[in-house]
Image (tube, rainbow, N blue to C red):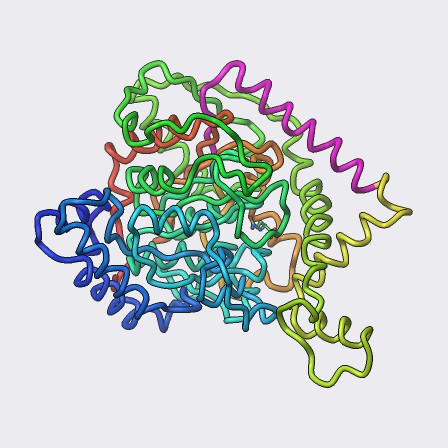
Amino acid sequence: MHNNSITQLAEGLRAGDFSSVELTRHYLQRINQLDEGLNSFITITEEQALAQAEAADKKLTAGEGGVLTGIPIAHKDIFCTQGVRTSCGSRMLDNFISPYDATVVERLSDAGVVMLGKTNMDEFAMGSSNETSFYGPVRNPWNLDKVPGGSSGGSAAAVAARLCAAATGTDTGGSIRQPAALCGITGIKPTYGRVSRYGMIAFASSLDQAGPMAASAEDAALMLQAMAGFDQRDSTSMQQPLPDYSATLNESLQGLKVGLPKEYFDEGLDAGVRQSVEQAIEVYTALGAEVREITLPNTGLAVATYYVVAPAECSSNLSRFDGVRGGYRCDNPVDLEDLYKRSRSEGFGEEVKLRILIGAYVLSAGYYDAYYLKAQKLRHLISDDFKQAFEDVDVIMGPASPTTAFGVGEKSDDPVSMYLSDVYTIATNMAGLPGMSIPCAPVGGLPVGLQIIGNYFDEARLLNVAHQFQQQTQWHQQLPEGV
Ligand code: GLN
């Protein structure tokens, strides 16, 4: 059953080949069998899942519900889920049971999905390898000695191992696309404002965006359909018409203008990954696309700019975790200051503390102009590069990640090399543009992601461009050994 697409599963449910309860049990059993080695789940909500599945079966028998009714999925543990622990991968929130659902969770529930559980992630979504989680590292199903990427590494590993039909993720600087690339699945980060951030624990509010992680573009389209749309509870949510993402998947790519930024094929790019991405681009040429080289001249500034803006916003967002209003509280504080200090020192992990310190520094009175203000200006330059580029091309393509999955522990002591994992994804977040990663030919047995970047609110085109590739190739259907 787990090799089927969401559309096929929906057909199976309607034809009575299996019930949602049976399908849910099947995935729960897979989680039981396979997740010990992967550690992709923090919480498994078996009882709730079976109750949701029963409700879905009733609907299906009555001839009601939509394509997602009764489909088992998982949520990244950054989304608030009513009555269920929402840890954000942190000791700070290990005991937090959310009193409400995030909009994304609510909308997917309304669409009838079954939630199997909450997936592991880098602490507060800070990381590129899923090694900063309080709940331990996640392993890559293609090779257990390798990382799955981060921060949505739990969702990526779970989908790659088919422990769920699809999952949710969030992307602040690459956290949907980079783990999707490293685990060989399909992930899309929508335009900033396309999907509500309400109930999604904030890391860097001006960059964070939720999106689906799935086995194919076709499945991602169905998930995004349910997740996206205006939400008055998120002040940055955009009032834009919501297209039917599945309706345009089969549009022809004849005459599609594809730009390849020369900065995305620099010396930092692994030779094998380059070859795989170039082969993927040939598939597009064969489909009638016109490919040309373009330039995004400020690409080299993106990582440095991000590591001022994101920590600044994180230091402000995370100040609410004070040991008083919720979250972890230290034992026997001697006074209020001791309570604050020890609760935060003990509740947060090293990477999170590093980011808070950097953020507080760049926002401090003496350095605000030199760092934070400067970074905001550079952010404009980075966005302008894309604006210019999209005057001549429809989509931009390149690698999602400079390398395939690296070893567990390999970059843990070298933050700069870790931060460079997102060198091709971060600029998209700075500009608020949508970006996607789809699997192309593996290198050394490890998946490679082709990144497709679109103009604002052009998710339908990205999904169309991805789907057409997946009609020509089988990479997205390849499964790791033992899965
Ligand atoms: N790897 C980047 C970071 O550590 C991006 C994380 C993300 O997109 N959430 O900040």
Q: Quadrant of the C terminus?
A: bottom left
Instruction: Decide whether residue 387 is among the magenta residues.
Output: yes
Identify whether 327 is placed above or below 397. below
Q: Position of residue 397 (x, y in %)?
A: 46, 30
Residue situated in front as seen by the camera: 8 or 474: 8
Identify whether 252 is placed above or below 322. above
Dominant secondary structure of the magenta stretch?
helix
Q: Quadrant of the N terminus?
A: bottom left
Q: Which residues lie in the magenta part?
A: 371-398
Identify whether 407 is placed above or below 191. below
**Is residue 393 shown left or right of residue 267?**
left
Q: Position of residue 335 (x, y in %)?
A: 82, 79
Residue at x-position 14% and y-position 49%: 62
Q: Quadrant of residue 308?
A: top right
Q: Residue furthest front?
A: 62
Q: Position of residue 310 (x, y in %)?
A: 67, 47
Q: Residue furthest bottom?
A: 332
Residue at x-position 14% and y-position 45%: 63
**Is residue 116 shown left or right of residue 97?**
left
Residue situated in front as seen by the camera: 302 or 120: 120
